[in-house]
Amino acid sequence: MIGLSTVAEVRAAEDVLLAATREGALMQRAATGLATVCLRLLGRAHGTRATLLVGGGNNGGDALFAGAHLAARGARVTAVLLDPARAHPAGLAALRRAGGRVAGPDGDDGLDRADLVLDGIVGIGGRGGLRPEAARLAQRAATGPGLTVAVDVPSGVDADTGAVGGAAFPALHTVTFGAVKPGLVVGEGRGYAGTVHLVDIGLGPHLAPARAHQLTDADVAVHLEPPGPGDDKYSRGVVGVVAGSAAYPGAGVLCTGAALRTRPGLVRHAGPAGDAVRTAWPEVIVTDGGPGEAGRVQAWVVGPGAGTDDAARRVLAEVLATDLPVVVDADALTLAAREPALVRGRGAPTVLTPHDREFARFGEPPGADRIGSARRLAADLGAVVLLKGDATVVAGPDGTAFVNATGTSDLATAGSGDVLSGILGSLLATGAPAAEAAAAAAHLHGRAGQVAAAAGPIVAGDLVRRLPETVGRVRGTGLPDSEA
Ligand SMILES: NC(=O)C1=CN([C@@H]2O[C@H](COP(=O)(O)OP(=O)(O)OC[C@H]3O[C@@H](n4cnc5c(N)ncnc54)[C@H](OP(=O)(O)O)[C@@H]3O)[C@@H](O)[C@H]2O)[C@@H](O)CC1
Ligand SMILES: Nc1ncnc2c1ncn2[C@@H]1O[C@H](COP(=O)(O)OP(=O)(O)O)[C@@H](O)[C@H]1O
Ligand SMILES: [K+]
């Protein structure tokens, strides 16, 4: 698991570490790590041009020291000082000693010819949107030729939430220190951070346990173990699915198929899409009646394509009245938003899986702070909330949160959510803790999207078809983790 640490958590750890190390040592570690990543990205230093955007705080200091490393290796380095009177004095001296130069107020800043632009405008000390001069430089970096690298955090991005108040530095890479900050991997900030590289500055032992995480393939593989010699079809967790209707039989087919393909043990289906499900998946045990006639299960998935009429409401209430884990998806979310009392106070775990519009039906749209919003709704309803998006967020009622690190925009295709809820049902049926099961489901769904999309455009059925291969890859050698 990769911990996501807030600014307050990083500052608290830094305070302890700063007191235990000689002055400037942490910044040297940060700057050396930053220069190393830049050299790797550039391939060489000699003959390259770098422009440093330098604010008046320690973030600017990091950029100046890293610039000095590059200049010492033959790069032509120009620093643009946004607040000349407060530019880090030791960093500035180091840059000058190494042969770097400072652009005068109206002089050539080299931005239009740079191979590399380092954003040291502002890091975790940023407040509010970028000021006008910083915003202009960020804009020029966006359209210039240089590889854009943010120091610690892309300037203009809120490190805790990923909110972007106005202009922000568009980084292709972000070199972050001590811990990955949530704002680099979630919300709008994710798009500005690019690939995230973590530099160890020794903060780890002093950091409070993170309250938000990203899962890796290895974390998810734990939930996808193959059956052992003592297993039978029941012991692997039986999933019950109430999905699909006469109008939308495909939702039932996709959802049951995904449940079956994730952990093939036993899947039961109840409801009016039975014929379509039987035809597509002869392995599924189908009843045309309600959930009560389906037989014993260990977890329910309810809602995809199921409608919002009185009959659908009765089925939802019946499933939520059980003492089993329940995934509430799609149409069932509309019903639950009308009647949150159906969810509140359940003894067994409930997982709600809204996209933004479904989320808004419970009160307010998620807004710029997606982790915070998901946590609030989870605490309010006493349920796990899986908020879908390009980086899906999962929050538990106790504040535990996960940000998904896998996926592709090819997943924006009809029925993709039905596949996710089927995967999630099968993981919940194993008895896995609900928030972690939800995060693991989002991870596997994202990986399936990556595997399927490698061959070209995808439809939701491709995700189901490629699930066995995806499970194998997540269990085995694994796909490369996203850098964060
Ligand atoms: N502590 C450590 O041990 C280590 C810290 N490290 C590094 O220090 C960084 C934190 O440094 P920090 O605390 O000095 O704050 P920082 O991010 O440079 O911001 C302050 C400057 O930004 C300015 N500014 C603010 N908002 C702005 C805006 N919207 N638009 C434009 N400007 C804005 C603000 O101006 P002011 O408001 O004061 O006028 C001030 O000049 C951290 O991210 C990491 O990179 C590493 O070296 C590892 C060791
Ligand atoms: N741009 C995107 N990048 C990554 N994943 C996406 C993107 N757009 C949608 N997804 C994912 O695709 C799925 C879509 O679910 P949903 O909107 O419920 O679809 P449907 O209702 O058609 O089944 C979610 O898991 C979501 O996270
Ligand atoms: K920065």
Image (tube, rainbow, N blue to C red):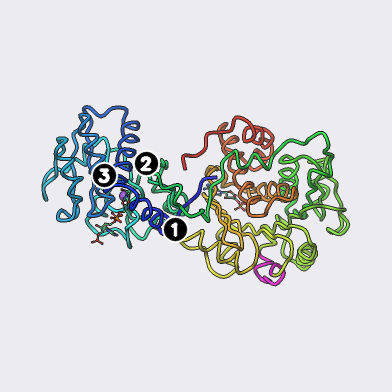
Is 460 on the left-hand or right-hand side of 157? right
For marks 2 and 1, the one nearer the N-term is 1
Q: Name the secondary structure under disc 1.
A: loop
Residue 289 drawn at (x, y percent): 87, 57
Which residues fall within the magenta stretch? 334-344
Give the amino acid at mark 2.
Leu
Query: Given contact means CB atoms under 8 Å apart, are the residues at marks 2 and 1 in contact?
Result: no
**Earlier along the polypeptide chain: callout 3 or callout 2?**
3
For label 2, the crowd category at 10 Å Cα-Cα, with few meaning under 14, some 14 to 19 and many 20 or more, is some
Q: Residue tagged by mark 1?
A: 161
CA distance for labels 2 and 1: 19 Å
Could you tell me the amino acid type at mark 1? Thr
Looking at the image, residue 303 sits to the left or right of residue 152; the answer is right
- State the mark number for residue 172: 2
Q: Main secondary structure of the magenta part?
A: helix
- Residue 386 inside the magenta-drawn segment: no
